[in-house]
Image (spheres, helix red, strand yellow):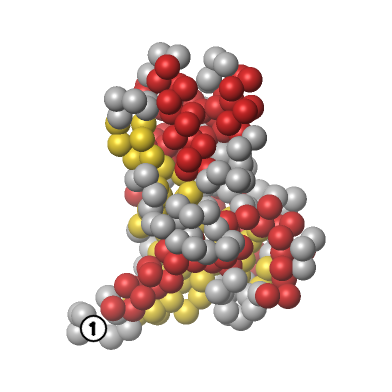
Amino acid sequence: MKNVENIKRILFVFDLDSTITKTGGDNMAFKILKDQNKAKELLGLFPKSSWCQIVNLLMIELKKEGITVEDYKNAIQSNSLNPGMQELLTFINSKKEKSDMVLVSGSNVFSVGWLLEKYNIKDYFKRIFANPAKLSEEKLIEIGSYQINDCSNCEVDLCKKLIVEDYLKHSLKEGIQYEKIIYVGDGHNDFCPVSILGSNDIAFPRIDFALYKKIYESEGIKDLNCEVIPWNDGYKILEHIKDINLL
């Protein structure tokens, strides 16, 4: 442990697919499969099979059809950012003396990296957490598991709550204490990390997406201690951050 005084900062935790981006990156990959009946069959396996398992099956089919890694990369990079996200991330990045950003994604390191590089925002994030991936002879890309967990709210491959908790513990050892956590997400697996936020923290769920529905339609809000502010674009989040003089 470093012998330093605790530095108080603000932590922003972002999901990627359908949060920073308009839709899921893997969804773009399914679209380039020539056999769309097979694509529908694979998508129908969720949620009985983990998303990681399904995408690995997709990678086998892409390889069979002669789709290249470059084709896959181009499909991933065809995804757009949600309106206002570029401005939001750029603003937060300009306040590095007060805050840190981390990205926690259930996607794989290749697709995450390609997307962030396209929009020149990769260096904005202090840490990027995603499932590991490597080139493979059988599959276009072989995707591994970031972790194996038994969390009832998350997929077996990656629990975002565990990642956030580990990151906070590691930061404390480095002398960094976050006085406020801002979580921006959209998916069912974002509820788990949101559930550990405190009364000084804020969760931003994307309106009408799984996290929002879990909070409001399934009464998940009863289990939350943090403030909840729904959003439909990055401008809404940026406006609130500026209104409360957070940075």
Q: Residues within 10 Å of mark 1 (few under 14, many from 20)?
A: few
For residue 147, say whether it is visible.
yes
As drawn, is 237 to the left or to the right of 208? left
Residue at 34%, 49% in the rendered image: 123
Residue 27 versus residue 244 in the image, above or below: above
Query: Percent from the top left, x then y, of residue 235?
Result: 63, 51
Circle 1: element type: loop
In-image side of 233 versus 94 (left or right): right
Left or right: 10 with respect to 41? left
Taking the spot 38% from the left edge, 40% from the top edge, the residue there is 143
Q: Residue 174's quadrant in the figure? A: bottom left
Residue behind mark 1: 4
Q: Where is residue 246 shown, x and y percent of the image?
A: 54, 71
Residue at (39%, 57%) from the top-left corner? 147
The foreground one among 189 and 63 is 63
Q: List x then y, in percent, for residue 26.
A: 52, 35
Residue 20 location in percent, x, y? Answer: 54, 46
Q: Residue furthest front?
A: 48
Q: Quadrant of the N terminus?
A: bottom left
Looking at this view, is 99 or 170 the one in front? 170
Name above or below for residue 193 compared with residue 41.
below
The mark total stands at 1
Q: Is residue 194 above or below residue 122?
A: below
> Which amino acid is tagged 1?
Val
- Is residue 95 in view? no
Q: Say which residue appears at 55% left-offset and 27% top-offset.
A: 30
Which residue extends farthest right? 217
